[in-house]
Image: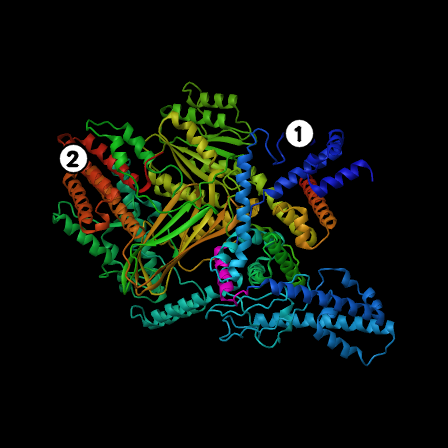
């Protein structure tokens, strides 16, 4: 598949040309998004002001992304819950220092990334979590009804391959590809130069491709 | 760097999206196959990465986190002035640090810093510790003072000191870890107040929040604490028990000790009950108590009264499909087996020291709670509902009571604590969930082929015989959900309860099926081959039409002539046509080879095993038994079940397709339960295609396998009965374990779901081999609770085939003593109980008609009608209940038919008997789709 074919196949989820562009809908959509963003940024302010409902909303919004981040970064299941709790306690303690002029998500992920780094640094347990642990989650949104055995095997393999990456590559990969954050935002979260983030991402991708090729060679050999 | 390298770098850095933004890149990709290949690989990789399932935090963790945050010190609101002041402060601090660093640089730190390679690793735990930690810096200064002062020697010495410091810290951590492991499980009674926990911030970090002290929180008594992470721990005195301020997490692995504590408490409770018991000899009690205290499971002993080995020989009374002689033989077999079991038990107990007289009166299913046999003495297990019901002597007059009395009697019986006997709420219990076509498929096909001149509106009867709607929501984020409800909203003393455990699977199902390794075994021993030639042709044609790439089908025939008619790999259109013609051509010379059904199953199984591999998905190695046989001898059935069970343990499942309308439902059920497969019915050739498609897609429609339902009653809650189930004896339980372990191992091999079975659990255990998408199952328990508080804990462990993981669903029930009116959930439990009663009544009425006792049938229907009417009068919540009104209409319709003149004809009686039996199953399972 070349570039044109990729574009034609609709790989890029950009604006679809089949739908007519409606500026009114776009504007409404943008306004809703802005209001939501503004509301999210007020959560911590409300929390500091004693609003009992603010933190649960924040927790609900962040529980899946953060738990996912911990899981994909390889925080072991024994300590994952502790780290998860620690992150939110830090958010709570540092809520007063949050400035509403800045986006909330990078701020939170910055805390999460540092907590994870600290966790690995102090516990020295930068170990790969086993595949079964990776799959042993408590609840996740439905990944789709079409579950094929081959697809699930691929995902299982991918889980393992990600766990074998160095942490600095893994966190970039998780933030940008799996969490879907822009490179600049990931760089801000990880406090790394943009080019370093790009390099890490490139190496992570190539390492995964190499792992895949190696696996395919092994399967053919078997 | 050439163009290709640059392109590949750009693609790997910016992802496949980069091609859309760069015209030159697109042009290069159009002409360079190597780079184009990389793009394709990257696209696939990104698609897989983005398609990875998103994991969510467990609810318990979120709740605990929220609780921890709420118990923490309130977050202070920072004003703009504070922020500005902080900025000033940080500015001053930066200047100070810069000046200090410059000074130190000049003073000779340069060499040391340059020699320390660990500083280059930003993730090292001691990356900048000497510069930032004043305590360590002081310690360092003190240690280096007596040594020489040459700059190089000084820096080396400092490096050594730092290295020693790291080693000491490591040792300290190890000691801490050892201390943690040696600690008692319970949390210390007093936790330090805020600020007492040392958080010196061992490592400098760019994160401004890292040095924020963790607020102290109280830990509930009896729960274990969860360890914190981080270098802070190393500063705590290793000799003192480590104290943490975290809220304990129920899901954390460290909390598993609580279950042990609870189990120990329960065992202690059990031991006390044992020692207080007067039923068994004191020595026996002490020995049993010691066994329990040692952590072993209570000895499971067969119970001659309640647990006969009737699983093998249960009599099928499905609309009279068995002849009277066959039924009698089955009953005789059952009686012989029951007597043998009682004799074995008697001998066993004699050697164990128990007196024979006690065996007659006590069923020691569990040493803790002897069960009086008298309760079940007059019970006959109903094949439809599985529950017991007292037999009535023929011709015995039943006291007619007004509707209210019937209802009052029913309600009194619901709450009655008199004359109850209790069973042990432990061990393995029979699973009565059989996936596939409901039994009504058989009955429906039977009913269609019967002749009658009674005017029956089938569609109306089907509409009336609807199952109770169950309040089970489909799980959205898991393959299975469990629910636990009670018929009481509160209790204030010893109370009899009905617990309802519901299982509901997700609607998700696979769209494509894996390649199947299928062996068809045709069992035509009872029937002439030409009798079902149309159905068999249609079945094989459907199989041929459904064959996909990778499928491997074979055909084996049991009987004479018998043998492998179509070997695996030759199942093609031409071969099938020739084989079918040979099979049904009377002119063709008959082979003298004879193959019994067990031999045919063995041969087909060996063929399946030869093509099996560890990678094949469970359910893809399938044996499809197509049978028109209505009767197997007891020995044959026993042998078949053992064979099928062993095959299932080896990963070869068995499904059964019944031809015609005279198949024995119970035999099919037994085989399918042993073979972990599905039950199908082929009433005519038109249904062949759907039957085959359903069967081939079964492997991809199972959403949960190895479903282990564990119901643990709280201490003080006693089990009276599990409706529709019975406790399995040791051999049966062993077979269940084997089957479960085989599924566990198989799924670990081919789907990577970790092995997690092999150990028995406390409480009632029911293992269901597989549950397909969109299915539900209800287990009803009759219990007595002594006091308000926790009643039961239900845990369902299963292999989630949607998300490929081991998953657990839990439900708990606590009943308070504060009065609360019964809601819809409580009423639903009562309605389920009523549905069981009604189904049982319909089934018994059917049996009465088979026995041509019309008066008894009329009485049974009348009593049931009065019960429903009375309940609607007595219970305001049920007064306008649609389900009960519909049931009353159903009963009235059958009562009308029983009063017709034509009902005296035998043909009509049999027809009505089948219709009643069908209605009984409709009531429990719903009509066929």
User: Which residue is more in the foreground, A152 or A19?
Assistant: A19
Tell me the chain of label 1: A
* Color theme of the render: rainbow
| Residue underneath mark 2 | B896
Q: CA distance from mark 1 to mark 2?
A: 72 Å
- Range of magenta residues: B58-76
User: Which residue is more in the foreground, B556 or B196?
Assistant: B196
Q: Quadrant of residue B795?
A: bottom left
Give the vertical position of B505 relative to B428 (above or below): above
Q: Callout 1: helix, strand or loop?
A: helix
Tell me the chain of label 2: B
User: Which residue is more in the foreground, B80 or B64?
Assistant: B80
Image point 81% across, 70% down: which residue? B104
The answer to the question of whether label 1 and label 2 lie on touching residues, with beta carbons closer than 8 A, is no
Say whether residue B74 is magenta.
yes
| Residue underneath mark 1 | A5
Q: Is there one chain holding both mark 1 and mark 2?
A: no
Quadrant of the image containing the C terminus of chain B: top left
Image point 77% across, 63% down: which residue? B118
């Amino acid at each position: 598949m070349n570039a044109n074919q990729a574009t034609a196949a609709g790989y890029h989820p950009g604006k679809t040309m089949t739908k007519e562009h409606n500026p009114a809908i776009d504007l409404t959509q943008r306004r809703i998004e802005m209001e939501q963003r503004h509301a999210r940024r007020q959560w911590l302010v409300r929390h500091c002001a004693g609003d009992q409902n603010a933190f649960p909303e924040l927790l609900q919004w962040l529980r899946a992304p953060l738990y996912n981040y911990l899981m994909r970064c390889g925080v072991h299941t024994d300590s994952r819950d502790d780290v998860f709790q620690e992150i939110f306690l830090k958010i709570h303690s540092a809520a007063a220092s949050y400035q509403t002029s800045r986006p909330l998500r990078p701020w939170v992920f910055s805390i999460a990334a540092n907590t994870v780094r600290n966790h690995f640094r102090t516990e020295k347990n930068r170990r790969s979590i086993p595949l079964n642990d990776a799959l042993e989650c408590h609840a996740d949104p439905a990944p789709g009804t079409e579950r094929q055995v081959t697809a699930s095997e691929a995902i299982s393999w991918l889980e393992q391959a990600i766990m074998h990456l160095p942490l600095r590559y893994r966190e970039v990969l998780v933030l940008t590809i799996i969490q879907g954050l822009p490179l600049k935002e990931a760089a801000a979260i990880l406090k790394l130069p943009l080019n370093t983030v790009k390099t890490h991402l490139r190496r992570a991708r190539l390492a995964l491709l190499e792992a895949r090729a190696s696996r395919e060679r092994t399967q053919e050999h078997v | 760097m050439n163009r290709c390298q640059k392109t590949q770098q750009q693609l790997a850095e910016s992802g496949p999206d980069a091609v859309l933004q760069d015209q030159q890149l697109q042009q290069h990709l159009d002409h360079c196959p190597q780079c184009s290949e990389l793009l394709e690989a990257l696209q696939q990789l990104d698609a897989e990465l983005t398609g990875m399932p998103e994991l969510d935090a467990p609810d318990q963790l979120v709740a605990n986190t929220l609780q921890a945050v709420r118990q923490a010190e309130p977050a202070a609101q920072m004003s703009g002035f504070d922020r500005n002041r902080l900025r000033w402060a940080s500015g001053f601090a930066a200047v100070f640090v810069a000046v200090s660093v410059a000074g130190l640089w000049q003073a000779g730190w340069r060499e040391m810093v340059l020699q320390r390679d660990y500083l280059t690793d930003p993730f090292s735990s001691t990356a900048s510790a000497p510069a930032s930690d004043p305590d360590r810096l002081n310690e360092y200064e003190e240690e280096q003072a007596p040594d020489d002062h040459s700059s190089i020697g000084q820096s080396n010495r400092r490096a050594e000191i730092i290295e020693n410091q790291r080693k000491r810290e490591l040792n300290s951590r190890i000691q801490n870890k050892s201390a943690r492991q040696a600690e008692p499980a319970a949390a210390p009674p007093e936790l330090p107040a805020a600020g007492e926990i040392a958080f010196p911030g061992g490592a400098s970090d760019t994160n401004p929040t890292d040095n924020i002290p963790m607020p102290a929180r109280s830990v509930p008594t009896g729960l274990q604490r969860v360890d914190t992470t981080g270098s802070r721990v190393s500063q705590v005195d290793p000799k003192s028990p480590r104290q943490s301020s975290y809220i304990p997490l129920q899901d954390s692995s460290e909390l598993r000790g609580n279950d042990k504590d609870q189990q120990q408490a329960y065992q202690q409770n059990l031991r006390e009950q044992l020692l207080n018991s007067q039923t068994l000899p004191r020595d026996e009690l002490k020995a049993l108590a010691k066994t329990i205290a040692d952590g072993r499971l209570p000895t499971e002993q067969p119970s001659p009264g309640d647990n006969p080995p009737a699983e093998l020989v249960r009599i099928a009374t499905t609309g009279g499909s068995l002849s009277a002689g066959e039924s009698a033989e089955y009953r005789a077999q059952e009686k012989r087996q029951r007597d043998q079991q009682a004799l074995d038990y008697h001998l066993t107990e004699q050697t164990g020291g128990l007196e024979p007289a006690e065996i007659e009166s006590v069923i020691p299913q569990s040493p803790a709670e002897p069960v009086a046999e008298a309760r079940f003495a007059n019970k006959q297990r109903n094949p439809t509902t599985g529950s017991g019901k007292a037999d009535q002597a023929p011709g015995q007059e039943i006291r007619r009571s007004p509707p209210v009395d019937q209802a009052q009697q029913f309600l009194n019986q619901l709450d009655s604590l008199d004359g109850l006997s209790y069973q042990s709420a432990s061990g393995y219990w029979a699973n009565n969930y059989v996936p596939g076509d409901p039994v009504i498929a058989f009955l429906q096909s039977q009913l269609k082929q019967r002749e009658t001149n009674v005017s029956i509106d089938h569609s109306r009867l089907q509409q009336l015989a609807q199952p109770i709607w169950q309040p089970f929501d489909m799980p959205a984020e898991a393959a299975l959900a469990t629910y636990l409800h009670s018929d009481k909203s509160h209790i204030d003393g010893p109370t009899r309860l009905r617990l309802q455990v519901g299982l509901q699977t997700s609607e998700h199902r696979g769209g494509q099926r894996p390649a199947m390794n299928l062996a068809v075994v045709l069992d035509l021993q009872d029937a002439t081959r030409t009798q079902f030639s149309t159905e068999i042709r249609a079945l094989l044609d459907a199989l041929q039409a459904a064959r996909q790439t990778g499928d491997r089908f074979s055909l084996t025939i049991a009987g004479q002539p018998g043998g492998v008619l179509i070997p695996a790999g030759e199942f093609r259109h031409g071969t099938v046509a020739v084989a079918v013609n040979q099979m049904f051509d009377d002119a063709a010379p008959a082979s003298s080879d004879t193959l019994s059904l067990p031999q045919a199953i063995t041969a087909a199984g060996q063929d399946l095993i030869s093509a099996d591999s560890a990678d094949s998905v469970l359910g893809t190695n399938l044996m499809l038994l197509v049978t028109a046989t209505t009767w197997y001898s007891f020995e044959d059935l026993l042998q078949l079940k053992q064979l099928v069970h062993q095959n299932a343990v080896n990963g070869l499942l068995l499904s059964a397709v019944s031809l015609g309308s005279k198949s024995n439902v119970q035999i099919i059920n037994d085989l399918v339960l042993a073979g972990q497969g599905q039950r199908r019915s082929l009433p005519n050739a038109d249904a062949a295609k759907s039957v085959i498609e359903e069967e081939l897609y079964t492997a991809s429609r199972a959403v949960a396998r190895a479903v282990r339902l564990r119901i643990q009653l709280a201490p003080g809650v006693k089990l009276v009965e599990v409706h529709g189930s019975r406790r399995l004896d040791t051999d049966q339980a062993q077979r269940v374990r084997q089957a479960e372990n085989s599924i566990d191992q198989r799924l670990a091999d081919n789907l990577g779901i970790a092995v997690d079975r092999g150990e028995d659990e406390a409480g009632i255990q029911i293992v269901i081999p597989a549950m397909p998408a969109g299915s539900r199952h209800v287990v009803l328990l009759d219990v007595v609770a002594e006091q308000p508080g926790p009643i039961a804990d239900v845990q369902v462990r299963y292999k989630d085939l949607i998300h490929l993981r081991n998953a657990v669903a839990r439900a708990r029930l606590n009943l308070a003593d504060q009065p609360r009116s019964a809601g819809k959930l409580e009423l639903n439990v009562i309605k389920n109980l009523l549905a069981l009663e009604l189904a049982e009544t319909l089934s018994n009425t059917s049996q009465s008609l088979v026995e041509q006792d019309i008066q008894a049938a009329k009485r049974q229907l009348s009593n049931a009608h009065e019960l429903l009417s009375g309940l609607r009068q007595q219970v305001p919540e049920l007064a306008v209940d649609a389900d009960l009104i519909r049931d009353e209409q159903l009963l009235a319709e059958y009562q009308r038919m029983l009063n017709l003149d034509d009902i005296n004809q035998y043909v009509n009686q049999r027809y009505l008997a089948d219709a009643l039996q069908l209605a009984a199953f409709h009531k429990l399972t719903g009509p066929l789709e």
